[in-house]
Image: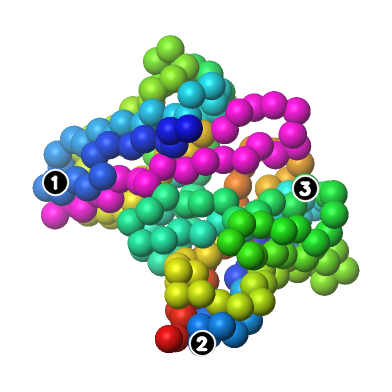
Amino acid sequence: AQSVTQLDSHVSVSEGTPVLLRCNYSSSYSPSLFWYVQHPNKGLQLLLKYTSAATLVKGINGFEAEFKKSETSFHLTKPSAHMSDAAEYFCVVSDPGNEKLTFGTGTRLTIIP
Amino acid sequence: EAGVVQSPRYKIIEKKQPVAFWCNPISGHNTLYWYLQNLGQGPELLIRYENEEAVDDSQLPKDRFSAERLKGVDSTLKIQPAELGDSAVYLCASSFRGSSSTDTQYFGPGTRLTVL
């Protein structure tokens, strides 16, 4: 069975400093992995997607994530946080050929001015 | 390109009343999903349609929940009767079932249901 664990429920960083949101996954196969962002009262928006191509995936708004099979991790990073990055972030896993997405419990990112 | 449209955005009802949510997917998307998102949690799949067919409804509580996707486009999710524990956000998503191993799902803004 597929699952994801988001290691931090809440992360606070100062504006202009790096962001690191941690995610570990469990899958019996070579999974597809996603990061989605959810701003208050807005729909979930896809940040980036990994599907067994390059292990370093670049997404929108300067975010990127690296797939590390040996560590079963898919951490999300951004070099410099912006106030508009404040939101809830979800790490998501899906086994190949399975359209079912399994979401983590989310990490709330707060940006300190 | 228009995104996934959901209505209403907010709904407040008393317990035991019926309620319905509507979703219009992105044009051309043949797969439609309904998710339930409880406060502080990630979304959980309720039902998945491919065109008109419900291909995965294993997580749908069929005693009180029902869904339909007539003509393979719009979809309606219904709860009858609603219970206090049904208070949550109901999300609709759509995707195009193509050759990709996992298709990207696009989400609507959700309907926030409050049951009093």
Residue under disc 2 on the same chain as residue under disc 3: yes
**Front of the two marks 3 and 1:** 3
Q: How is the image coloured?
A: rainbow
Is B76 a magenta residue? Answer: no
> What residue type is disc 2 on?
Ser
Q: Chain of mark 2?
A: A
Mark 2 surroundings: few (<14), some (14-19) or many (≥20) residues within 10 A: some
> What residue type is disc 3 on?
Thr
* Prevailing secondary structure class for the magenta stretch in the rendered image: loop
Question: In x, y percent, where is residue B78?
Answer: 29, 32
Q: Chain of mark 3?
A: A
Residue under disc 2 on the same chain as residue under disc 1: no
Q: Which residues are magenta?
A: B95-116
Residue located 40% across and 15% down the image: B70
Q: Which residue was labeled with disc 3?
A: A51
Residue located 74% across and 52% down the image: A50
Question: Is B11 placed left or right of B47 in the picture?
Answer: left
Residue B86 visible here: no
Q: Helix, strand or loop at disc 3?
A: loop
Q: Chain of mark 1?
A: B
Question: In x, y percent, where is residue A22?
Answer: 65, 74
Camera-nearest residue between A14 and B103: A14
Q: Which residue was labeled with disc 2?
A: A14
